Image (cartoon, rainbow, N blue to C red):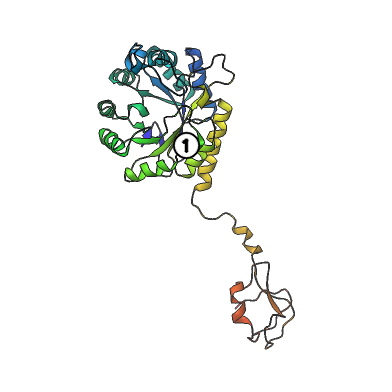
Amino acid sequence: MKIGNREIGNGKVPYCVAEISGNHCGSLDNAKRLIRAAKRAGADAVKTQCYEPGTITLDCNKLDFIVQDGLWKGRTLWDLYSKAHTPFSWHKDLFKVARDEDITIFSSVFDRTSVDFLEKLGCPAYKIASFEVIDLPLIEYAAKTGKPLIISTGLAKDREILEAHDAAGGKAAFLHCTSDYPGTVEHADLGRMTHIDILLGLKNPVGISDHTPSFNNIPIAATAMHAAIIEKHLKLANAADISEDDTFSIPPMMFKAMVESVRATHEAMRPRARSNNGSRQFRRSLYVVKDVKEGEVLTLDNIRSIRPGFGMAPKELPKMLGRKAKRDYRKGDPLTL
């Protein structure tokens, strides 16, 4: 998979995505600041959520439309999304800021209108949120654009992940997430990443969307498990207002530290030739520890396994004991064939 000029997966450095979500607190200026902060923090991309209340739910007070538990318990979906949404009208300005900052920007889509709208802006990729993973017509519609898709799995069962995979034409990346807000480390279930990878035949980029308050525990562990994508919510430092997503978002300095940790972990995981060959001289080997004349029997009294490592390997000691020296040796000479 490739988004912009960035290859994703196949042993590449994890693609770090800064999710803006509702952390702009209803301010276009804050949204622009978040994009700039994402760039400064080293993110590979910044992501918005392209919906408005009327494109995602109804203004209705019936029980079905009221959150029953969790962080937003008691609030209507309409109220929640009214506060958290990023208006369509902002996106042109946000895409321009991202271009000026030379950072990739793309968006989650929630219905056909958001896909059509973002296509006009040249959006380079689309995200399918975890609660939309079962909306196969939406996935198919987004896939028809030919743009890369990233799909969060959330509460999806294996069958539903495979259905989403097929709806995307088999070419999407998939992110494990718990759909808990906020998430917890003890329920992160990172083994699910490996399960999804195997489920999809090891052919699709697999990563994680992390909703825990911890800034780098989960991203580091996911990177060690070869995550191709790391998504984390970014918020402004010392924001005047508290957003709906505040508890599972991290400020720019922490995001920067997370990106650095992810890249360092990836670097440490890379297979390569060992870089400590210069230290081989300090390994043990067989040395003459007393002067030995030609024809003299080699014993534990005149040869030993010591440092440095320019003589024969210590494993040869039993074979050398009892043999006669074929030449004169001085104390400190390496024993060689």
Q: In terms of depth relative to the viewer, which is nearer, 269 or 104?
A: 269
**What residue is shown at x 58% (from left), y 28% (from top)?**
253
Tally the numbered discs. Answer: 1
Q: Amino acid at mark 1?
A: His
Residue occupied by mark 1: 187
Q: Quadrant of the C terminus?
A: bottom right
Q: Residue at x 49, y 44 (%)?
A: 224
Q: Where does residue 164 sit, x and y in percent of width and height? A: 29, 34
Residue 204 at what x, y percent from top left? 34, 41
At numbered mark 1, what does the secondary structure look like: helix, strand or loop?
Answer: helix
Residue 306 visible: yes
Q: Position of residue 43 (x, y in %)?
A: 49, 30
Establish if 200 lies above or below 42: below
Q: Is residue 281 left or right of residue 10?
A: right
- Compared with 32, 139 (above or below) is below
Q: Is residue 104 left or right of residue 322?
A: left
The residue located at (45%, 21%) in the rendering is 21
Compared across the picture, whether 209 is left or right of 161 comes to right
Which quadrant holds residue 179? top left
- The residue lying toward the viewer, choosing from 156 and 309, is 156
Image position of 91 (left or right of 285): left
The N terminus lies in quadrant? top left
Residue 312 in view of the camera = no
The 10 Å Cα crowd at callout 1, few under 14, some 14 to 19, many 20 or more, is few
Q: Position of residue 103 (x, y in %)?
A: 46, 26
